């Protein structure tokens, strides 16, 4: 994004608002993918390392830790993800739990994530 002022926190808030509105969107920024669903969920993914952080659930924003400067950012990743056909599979670092979610736009996500 040479020449453009990019703030990850702004993009996160945008995708959280889209989720709250029930608007399905997919944004890609370098190795990052942000997406929202019609059911009000939103996620931030790192497609290189398969890292994931939930940004919203059922239209309600969830907290995420982002440290950002003019040239770098760091994200408090909460788990990992995989896409297996129609299933979005999330493994939580803290609990060790695995959640399989159906109904996400996995066909489109598999092309970018």
Image (spheres, helix red, strand yellow):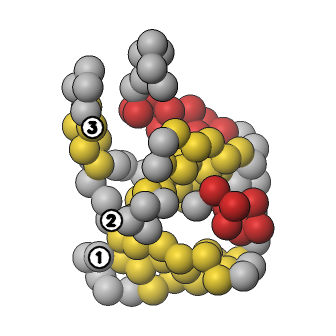
Q: How many labels does the image show?
A: 3
For mark 3, give the secondary structure.
strand
Q: Helix, strand or loop at disc 2?
A: loop
Q: What element carries label 1?
A: loop
Residue located at (41% from left, 33% from top): 8
For marks 1 and 2, give the CA distance: 6 Å
Residue 26 position (above or below residue 95): above
Looking at the image, residue 36 lies above or below residue 85: above
> Disc 2 and disc 3: Cα gap in Å?
16 Å
Q: Which residue is rendered at x = 26% and y = 21% of the image? A: 70
Looking at the picture, does residue 28 appear above or below residue 112? above
> Which badge, 1 or 3, is on the more N-terminal residue?
3
Residues under numbered marks 1 and 3 in contact, where contact means CB atoms less than 8 Å apart? no
User: Does 103 sit left or right of 26 as displayed?
Assistant: right
Q: Which mark is residue 73?
A: 3
- Residue 56 visible to an observer of this rendering: no
| Label placed on residue 78 | 2
Q: Mark 1 points at which residue?
A: 93
Indicate left or right for 5 with 77 as reference.
right
Residue drawn at x 56%, y 32% is 14
Q: Where is residue 18 in the image (x, y as percent from the top left)?
A: 66, 39
Q: Which of marks 1 and 2 is nearer the N terminus?
A: 2
Categorize mark 3 by other alpha carbons within 10 Å: few (<14), some (14-19), many (20+).
few
Hey, which quadrant is residue 92 in on the image? bottom left
10 Å crowding of disc 1: few (<14), some (14-19), many (20+): few
For disc 2, the neighbor class at 10 Å (few under 14, some 14 to 19, many from 20) is some
**Mark toward the start of the polypeptide (2 vs 3):** 3
Q: Residue 44 carries which label?
A: none
Instruction: Give how far across and how far down residue 29 sits, in percent.
Output: 52, 39
Question: Is residue 13 rendered to the left or right of residue 105?
Answer: left
Asked whether the beta carbons under mark 1 and mark 2 sit within 8 Å of each other, the answer is yes
| Residue 51 x, y percent position in the rendering | 39, 65
């Amino acid at each position: 994004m040479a020449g453009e002022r990019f703030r990850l926190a702004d993009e996160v808030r945008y995708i959280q608002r889209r989720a709250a509105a029930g608007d399905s969107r997919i944004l890609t920024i370098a190795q990052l993918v942000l997406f929202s669903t019609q059911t009000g969920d939103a996620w931030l993914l790192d497609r290189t390392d398969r890292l994931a952080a939930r940004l919203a659930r059922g239209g309600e924003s969830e907290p995420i830790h982002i440290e950002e400067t003019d040239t770098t950012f760091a994200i408090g990743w909460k788990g990992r993800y995989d896409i297996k056909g129609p299933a979005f599979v999330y493994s939580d670092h803290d609990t060790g739990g695995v959640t399989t979610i159906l109904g996400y736009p996995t066909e489109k996500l598999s092309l970018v994530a």
